[in-house]
Image (cartoon, grey):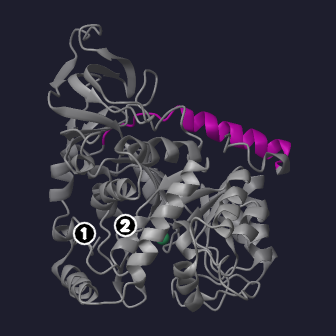
Amino acid sequence: MNYRSKGKGQRSKTTMIAALLLVASLAQAQRPAIGPAVRPFVRSDAAVIALTNARVIDGTGAPAREGQTIVLRDGKITALGASGSVTVPAGAETIDLAGKSVLPGLVMLHEHLYYPTGPGMYGQLGLSFLRLYLAGGVTTMRTGGNLNGYVDFNLKRGIDSGIVAGPAMDATAPYLNGGPFPLRQVRILKGPDDARKMVAYWADEGATSFKAYMQITRAELGAAIEEAHKRGLKVTGHLCSVTFAEAAKLGIDNLEHGFMVATDFVPNKQPDVCPAGARQQAFAAFDPAGPVASALIRELVARKVAITSTLTVFETSVPGRPVPPGLEVLVPQLREQFERQHAAIARQTDTLQGVTLKREMAMELAFAKAGGLLVAGTDPTGYGGVIPGYSNQRQVELLVEAGFTPLEAISIGTLNGAKYLGRDAQIGTIAVGKQADLMVVAGNPAAQISDVRNVEIVFRLGVAYDPKKLIESVKGSVGLH
Ligand SMILES: [Zn+2]
C-alpha cells in the first residue's frame, strides 16, 4: 500500500515541487557535527564502525539471523552478512556483539515533549524527554500534538544541527480543536476558514504534521485536511466529535489510540458533538468480532487510514497492571503523585478498564491482520507514568500481549512507523544502503520480547550513543526541563 500518494490529486504544481524537494532533503539526512551539549553522550563517532558476531533482527519481520557483521560508514549501513563473508575494513572501530541483538531504531508516532504536571496542566519537558527517547532506542519520532507552540520546531532544528541530543523528529503543530475545550493550553478554532489558516501558518513555521482533537467539527477537520494535503503534509487525530468513519471519508491519514476512542459505536451519536461519557461504555459493550467492527476496519483499510496503538497510556488506568518502568527519572514530587494514583487504581474492583484494554488489543490485531497499517506510539500523558524511552519498549511488549509475534511487534515499532512517514527507503529496517539508525540490546527479543529493555547502544546516523549517560543526565530531574 502506498501511504505517500494520499491527497496528491489536490496538490498544485508548485507545492508538488516543494514536496519533492522536502522528500529529497529527508532522503539525505546529513550527519551533523556533534555539538558540546551532545558530545558527553557519544560513545563513538568513528567514521567506520564494524559490529561483529551480532544477532540481527532486521525489522521486516524476517527471522533473526545469528553471527552477522554490520559495517557502518558515514552514517549508513554499507555491508551486512555472515561474519565470515563480510570484510571488516582496515581502521574500522570494531564492537563485538556476541550475545547481543541489533534492531532498527524505533520509529514511534505518538510522542510528546510535555507531561502532566498538575491538574489539567502540562509542563514542557523537551530536553529531558528527547534524551530519554534516544536512550530507549527511539531514533525517529513524531510528536502527536503540541501544546507549546514553537518548542517542537526549535528542538527539531537543534537536533538536525547537532546541538541537541535526541531522535530525528517529525514535529506536529499545536492541536487543531474546536470548543468548548478543557485543555487551557489549546487554541479554539472559529470555523473551517480558521482551520485552513491555522494549518497554513504552522506549516510555514515548520510543522511537518498536524493533529486534530476531540471537539473539532467535520467542516473544520475537512478544511484542515485539505490544506495540509495541498502542502504534502499529513493529518492525524485523537477524535471524539467526529467518528472514525466520518474522518476516513474526509481523508484523514491516521487515527490515534486505536478503536477505544472511536465514537462510531455510540448509540444516537449527535453530529459534531463529543459524547465523551458514553464512549467507553459503548466500546465495552460492542463485539470486536462482530459485523460493526469488521465493517469499520474494512473502511479504514480501504481508505488507507493508519491506526496508532498507544497501549502504554491505557495500561496505567487498568487495575492490577504492573507499575510502569522508568519512574525513577522523575522529580520526586511527580513520582509520588503518580505512585499515589497508581496505587489507588490498583485498589479498584471495577473491571471496565481491563475489559476495554483487552478489547482494544483484539481490535488492533484484527485491523493489522485485515491489512491495515498499525503503527506504535506511547502518549506520555494520562495522569503520568508513561516515561519516554522506557514506555516505547513497553509498547512493543504490549503488542506481543495483544497477540503479535515478537518479530511482528518489532516491525510495527520500526518499519511501520517509517512507512507512515514515507521514509521506509531510509529508515525502519536494517539493510545495506539504509541509514545507520540501530539499537543494540543484550539478549534476544525475538525469543523474549522483554529483552528490548536491555538497550546498550543506540546508533543514530552511525553515531553511537550511550543510553546510561543519557539517562543519568536527567535522572531525578524529569519534570523540570
Ligand atoms: Zn497524545
Three-letter amino acid code at the position of disc 1 = Pro
Residue 126, given in percent of the width and then of the height, sits at: 37, 65
Side (left or right) of 219 relative to 318: right
Depth check, front residue: 189 or 393:
393
Q: Position of residue 124 (x, y in %)?
A: 38, 73
Establish if 387 lies above or below 457.
Answer: below
Q: Please, what secondary structure does the residue beneath circle 1 have?
A: loop
- The disc, 1 or 2, on the residue closer to the chain's N-terminal end is 2
The answer, for residue 112, to whether it is visible in the render is: no
Assess whether mark 2 and mark 1 are in contact (beta carbons under 8 angstroms).
yes
Q: Which quadrant holds residue 481?
A: bottom left
Secondary structure of residue under mark 2: helix
Q: For the N terminus, which image quadrant?
A: top right
* Residue 53 on the magenta segment: no
Asked where in the image residue 327 lies, by quadrant, the reply is bottom left
Image disc number at residue 312: 2
Residue 380 location (% of width, % of height): 38, 70
Residue named by callout 1: 324
